[in-house]
Amino acid sequence: MSMHSISLTINGKKFEGQAEARKLLSDFIREDIGLTGTHVGCEHGMCGACTVFIDGVGVRSCLTFAVQADGTSIETVESLAKDGKLSPLQEAFWENHGLQCGFCTPGMLICAEELLRENKNPTEQEVRLAISGNLCRCTGYHHIVLSILAAAKKLQGAAQAA
Amino acid sequence: MKPPKFEYRAARTVEEAVSLLQEAGEDAKILAGGQSLVPMLNFRLTRPSHLIDINKVSELDYIREKDGKLAIGALTRERTIERSALVRQKFPLLTEATEWIGHVQIRNRGTIGGSVAHADPASEYPALVVLSDAELTIQGPDGSRTTTWDEFFVTYLTTSLQPFEVLTELRFPLPKPGSGYAFVELARRHGDFALVGCAAQVTMNGKGTCQEARLALIGVGPFPHRSPDAEAMLKGQKLTDKLISEAGQKISEEVEPEGDMHASTEYRRAMSKVFTERALKKALSRVQGGK
């Protein structure tokens, strides 16, 4: 069994640890770094709950080994709220009943965040496509779609005010 | 589940990847985007002794036009291909095929070389390798070799890649002027594995006669299905609805799809006709300067 040293940035903070090659990044984030916002559902890339940003790109952390994240910068769902204040996207989920049991929420938020970073004014169809890789076990997709569309409006309003 | 134990090595160059494969022995596997391999590891469907990670082999990440072909490095991410203006302009069939692959976050990691080397019978890129008779460059301990799909694809998830070899480049001949294209697919939900899919490329002359038709179907056999007979039926002809239907019928009689819980053999066979027709009609409608 070979251990690998892993040094990375997680939500803006440095973290150093050790992991076996077979340790999934999702488990490293939850068990070693101790951030349990990232959820683990299917462990084969189908449910999207474990999605995080690696160097700004949304990826399934259950399909990435921790050792592969050495030297990268990772953002998890915990990075969205700043100074205890929800991000406009999180607020929109709260206001539009975008959460039910909350299990899929971290993946939904990261995938929605990735969409909104690139597309400031998505159509409903584009929103549905953006979360097509995320399973909601409560099947509450409608309110998640409404939440993301509402977040886009909030962000547009904020950009105009600035 | 969690992956079984393995040793991990990361390569920086193709040469280093080949030598790490040799050091590791025959049970080693290349790790590219990992979007197919890691699920198989998590389910313990495969137990390689070593993974040789090529994600930092940046020399394999490129898209270039060269001698009438589109040359794409094996490590090029699907998302990069999807967004490439060069691909969209020169070989839009590849752009359209890419949009069918999984979801954004899968395409962010998945690579073209990984998809082709994995050789899933339902995946999109192998269909384009077959349709366009693309050249595949493979690097091994004794240097590089070039091959084509008829030698490369062996059966389900099996290629002629040898233990110490790495697929490095795919070269797609560009469609001739007067060509139209389409990639159509049947899946239960967008991004799911295709039950049946069809890629079509038709080249028409100014008089509305088909000069060349190329078809490749996925999900209907161990690797993408090409039909010389159906293509020959279309060549030199006006592509009427009747002829298109006959070509679809021909293909549905040729294919030998396996049935599973998602779709029976009979259904896949019936859909191979429907999707061949749809692909041909859509391709024809996209020929510049009329049919």
Image: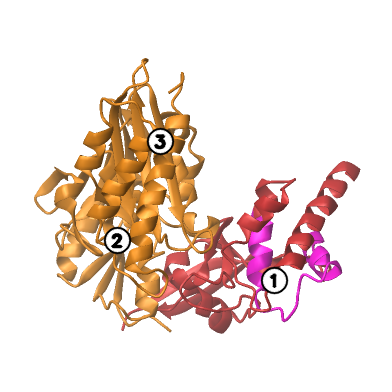
Residue B53 occupies which quadrant of the picture? bottom left
Q: How many marks can you see?
A: 3
Residue B243 occupies which quadrant of the picture? top left
In the figure, is residue A89 to the left or right of B249? right
Which mark, residue B241?
Answer: 3
Which mark, residue B118?
Answer: 2
Quick check: marks 3 and 1 in contact, CB under 8 Å?
Answer: no
Which residue is at the front of the view, B182 or A46? B182
Residue, disc 1: A78
Which residue does the image show at 19% across and 63% down from the upper left?
B21
Which mark, residue A146?
Answer: none
The part of the chain drawn in magenta is A87-114
Chain that bears disc 2 = B
Specify whether residue A96 is painted magenta: yes
Quick check: marks 2 and 3 in contact, CB under 8 Å?
Answer: no
Amino acid type, label 1: Glu
Which one is earlier in the sequence, the residue at label 2 or at label 3? 2
Chain that bears disc 1 = A
Q: Secondary structure at mark 2?
A: helix
In the figure, is residue B206 to the left or right of B162? right
Q: Secondary structure at mark 3?
A: helix
- Please determine if labels 2 and 3 lie on a single subunit: yes
Q: Position of residue A138 (x, y in %)?
A: 68, 78
Which residue is at the front of the view, B231 or A63? B231
What colour do you see for chain B?
orange
